[in-house]
């Protein structure tokens, strides 16, 4: 199993209501030298989180202990720019399991799902309600239900459906990446190959 299974996530959320966040802002290019997926979380939003002397920027949201949780709530057009997988790796390694936005760049969306992060695209109106709930109460809870494909703002009891490709949904539910999916079908593939040889 490549990643944790994703079924239902109930968590507080970290708000980042900035539009057009690109992958270089998520993980700057100078940190792309590693070949394993570990350690990227330390440099998530590096230039926004730290000063040149490596001291934390007190006004950046990830440095504010009031906010925590496994859900990152971004502005519209989240994950634009280059196709680097490392952006998704950094978000996962930091501890987020879901990113919510009103629009995702397609490649970033795919990279997230491939590493076990669920990108939940909501309407602009619902996104603003989520951000308002967090602003009013940093401990506001949200539920992401992958089997039902719903996101619920527990504070307001409002719910919205989200879309996801069926194959990708199955992989997230099982904790599979693409290789794990094929490995799980090994006996079926072998049976098919044997039948073809007859």
Image (cartoon, grey):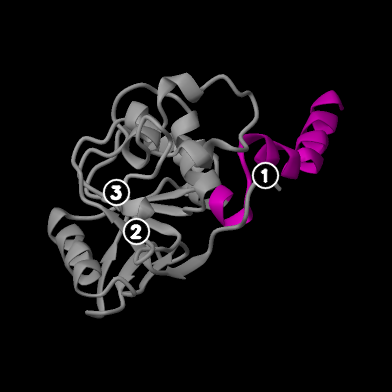
Q: Percent position (x, y) of residue 129?
A: 17, 66
Q: Which residue is mark 1?
A: 2
In percent of the image, x 46 and y 20: which residue is there? 30
SS assignment at label 1: loop
Q: Residues within 10 Å of mark 3 (few under 14, many from 20)?
A: few
Dominant secondary-structure state across the stretch colored magenta: helix
Question: Of the residues tagged 2 and 1, which is closer to the observer?
Answer: 2
Sequence-first disc among 2 and 1:
1
Q: CA distance from mark 2 to mark 1?
A: 31 Å
Q: Percent position (x, y) of residue 192?
A: 77, 34
SS assignment at label 2: loop
Compared with 121, 46 (above or below) is above
Is there a contact, CB below 8 Å, between mark 2 and mark 1?
no
* Residue in the foreground of this view, choosing between 8 and 36: 36
Q: CA distance from mark 3 to mark 2?
A: 7 Å
Is there a contact, CB below 8 Å, between mark 3 and mark 2?
yes
């Amino acid at each position: 199993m490549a990643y944790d299974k994703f079924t239902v996530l109930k968590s507080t959320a970290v708000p980042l209501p900035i539009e057009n966040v690109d992958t270089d802002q998520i993980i700057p290019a100078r940190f792309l030298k590693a070949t394993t997926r570990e350690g990227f979380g330390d440099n998530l939003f590096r230039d926004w989180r730290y000063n040149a002397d490596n001291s934390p920027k007190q006004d950046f949201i990830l440095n504010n202990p009031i906010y925590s949780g496994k859900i990152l709530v971004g502005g519209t057009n989240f994950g634009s720019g280059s196709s680097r997988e490392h952006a998704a790796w950094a978000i996962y390694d930091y501890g987020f399991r879901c990113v919510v936005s009103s629009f995702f760049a397609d490649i970033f969306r795919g990279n997230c799902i491939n590493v076990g992060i669920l990108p939940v695209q909501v309407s602009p109106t619902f996104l603003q309600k989520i951000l308002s709930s967090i602003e009013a109460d940093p401990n506001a809870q949200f539920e992401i239900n992958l089997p039902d494909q719903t996101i619920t703002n527990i504070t307001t009891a409002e719910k919205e459906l989200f879309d996801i490709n069926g194959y990708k949904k199955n992989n997230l539910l099982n904790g599979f990446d693409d290789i794990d999916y094929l490995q799980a079908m090994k006996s079926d593939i072998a049976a098919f190959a044997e039948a073809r040889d007859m």
